[in-house]
Image (cartoon, grey):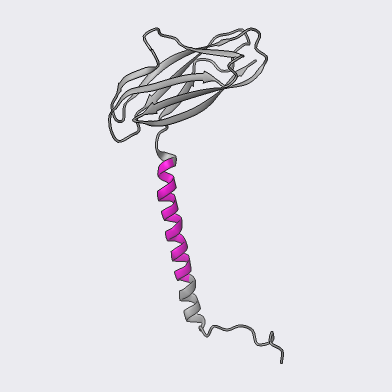
Amino acid sequence: MGIYDSGISIGFGPEKQKILAYAAMAIAGILIIAGIAVFGGQLLSPSPIEFRFEKNPVKGSETAKVTVTVTNTSDKDAKDVKLSVSAKEETELGVFPSSDKFNGTIPDLSRGTSREVAFMVNPVGNVLPGTYVLVARAEINGKEHTKEAILTVE
């Protein structure tokens, strides 16, 4: 008789093996639920920055209007929220607030509220067709948030 002929036996009968299988499934279920609770909350929480294009795609010579919504998702009111929007391809697109009243700072932003700021995206010279990345940055209560959006030029 070889060492592999007898097999490995822990000494559990069929009933105990069934109990162990149920216990393992219960532990796996608890871990899955805990993972969903921890990471699912992050997925369901609203983003502090959202983009909305008036028109996308645009022609190469067209100015595009984009509205950026900043939401205070922190647990306290915010003062002097800094907001900037720029194009990654700065030599191809210029981005400017559409209102002279906006100086780059939102003075007050209560917890759970939002503000909309419109920006104009202007082509610099002849812009080739393709996709261009716009980046919005907002600093709310000392925490910086960043979001990117794609503008398509035809």
Residue 110 falls left or right of residue 150:
left
Q: What residue do we see at 28% from left, 29% from top?
A: 77
Vertical relation: 24 (above or below) 80: below
Residue 30 falls left or right of residue 149:
left
Q: Where is residue 78 in the image (x, y as percent from the top left)?
A: 30, 27
Q: How many labels does the image show?
A: 0
Vertical relation: 114 (above or below) 126: below
Q: What residue do we see at 63% from left, 7% from top?
A: 125
Q: Where is residue 93 in the image (x, y as percent from the top left)?
A: 58, 14
Which of 45 and 106 lies nearest the eye of the viewer?
Answer: 106
**Residue 28 part of the magenta-drawn span:** yes
Q: Main secondary structure of the magenta part?
A: helix
Q: For residue 46, which quarter of the picture?
A: top left
Which region is colored magenta? Answer: 22-42
Q: What residue do we see at 61% from left, 14% from top?
A: 91
Q: Position of residue 132 (x, y in %)?
A: 60, 21
Q: For residue 42, which quarter of the picture?
A: top left
**Residue 143 part of the magenta-drawn span:** no
